[in-house]
Amino acid sequence: MNIAFVRIAVGWIYHLERNPALSQDYKMYIGQNPVPDEVSGAIHGRWDFVIHNVNKLYADKAKDELRFWLNHHHITHVVTCQKLIWYSNIVEALCKELRLPLIWCELFFDNRIIVDKSGLQYCKQNDLHYESLGTPTEPLIPSATRGRQPEDVTPEQLYKWYLTSRDDDVVIVLGQTPFDMSLREYPLVCYEQWFDQLFTSNPKTKFLFKHHPSCETISVRKYPNVHEIKTNINSLFNAFDRFAAFSSTTIMEGMIRRKKFVTGGYHFCSGKGLTIEPGITGTYLSDITGQLNAHVIPEEALQRRLWFICNKYTIPLASPKLVDRIKLSSEEFFK
C-alpha cells in the first residue's frame, strides 16, 4: 500500500512508525502543521512530508495540489481527519474522483484512533451500526479523559460549593466548543438552540455548566438557572447522576459509569435508547429531571455499544489491526 495520511496530528506519526504491519508500506504526511525534527529524526521507514499551505478562498488550487501529490506518489489509500470541514470535503471529493478508498479518523483515548469508512460518530451516517456483528467481550475502557482537568474533589465538597445535593433538582451540563465539527450535523436543533430549550423549559432546575476545556460557551451566562463551574469531570460523575450534553465524547464517558443523559446531536451512544434523545416533536426537553429519574439504561445495549466502540471501532495507532481496517471493507473487518 501507498498511504496518504492527511491532516492527522503530527504526534501520530511517531506511533504509526512503530506499527510493524506498516513498516514495508510507503507513507505520506500531508498537513498544515510542520513535522518537528524530533519526530522526523525518529523515522526509519518510507515517509514523505508535505506541508500544505491552504486557504479556503483558493479551494480549487488546494484540490489541484492534492491531486498532483496523490497521483505522483501512486497513493492507494487515504486516511484523513476530520469530516465536515471544507478541506476534508475536498479530500472526499478527490478520492471519489480518483477512486481511492477513504478512511475517516479522529483521536480517541490512550493513543487509539476512531476509524470509520462512512463518516464519524458525530455524523448521521457512520459505521457504528456494525455493532450487531460479533460477540461482545469486556470493553477496553479508556484510562483517562482527554482534556486537562482541575484537581479531583469529593462529592461533599462539591455539594458545599454549589449549595446542592445529589437528590436536588440539579442537572450537570457538559459543554461543547461552538466551532466543533460535531455541531455541523444534528437532528432538529443546533447546539445553542438546544441548550436554550433545555434551560428555558426547566426554569426550576439548577443547571451546573462545565465549559469545554478548549472554549467557553459564553451565551449560557444569560440564563438565571445556569451556574458556571470549573470542576474535574470525574468528580462530577462521582457526585451527580443526571447529565446533559450535545454531541460530546463525555456522553460515552458518563455512560461507562451508568450516568443518565439527555443529549442532542449525534454521538457515540446515539440510537439505542441509551440516552434521552430528540423525538419527532422536539419537545423532549421538558420536565428533564423527571425524565432522567425515570429513564432506564438498557444494559445489554450499552454493553454491546461500549464493547464495539472500545474494542472494534477504535484501534491503537501501533496495532497491526489498523492495516486490516484500512484494507478491508467495514463489513469484512467487523465480521
Image (spheres, helix red, strand yellow):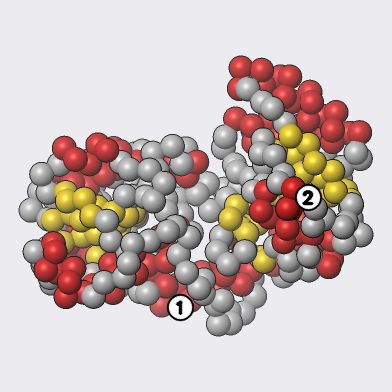
User: Is residue 110 depicted above or below 49 in this figure?
Assistant: below
For label 2, the residue is: 40
Q: Residue at x 23, y 75 (%)?
A: 154
User: Is residue 128 depicted above or below 193 in this figure?
Assistant: below
In the rendered image, the quadrant that contains the C terminus is: bottom right
Q: Residue at x 47, y 37 (%)?
A: 184
Q: Which mark is residue 242?
A: none
Q: Position of residue 160 (x, y in %)?
A: 11, 68
For label 1, the residue is: 300
Quarter location, residue 65: top right
Q: Amino acid at mark 1?
A: Glu
* Dots 1, 2 in contact, CB < 8 A: no
Query: Which badge, 1 or 2, is on the more N-terminal residue?
Result: 2
Q: Amino acid at mark 2?
A: Ser
Secondary structure category for the residue under label 1: helix
Quarter location, residue 81: top right
Q: Position of residue 301 (x, y in %)?
A: 46, 72
Left/right placement of residue 162 relative to residue 18 reads: left
Secondary structure category for the residue under label 2: helix
Q: Nearer the viewer, residue 141 or 230?
A: 230
Q: Residue at x 56, y 37 (%)?
A: 84
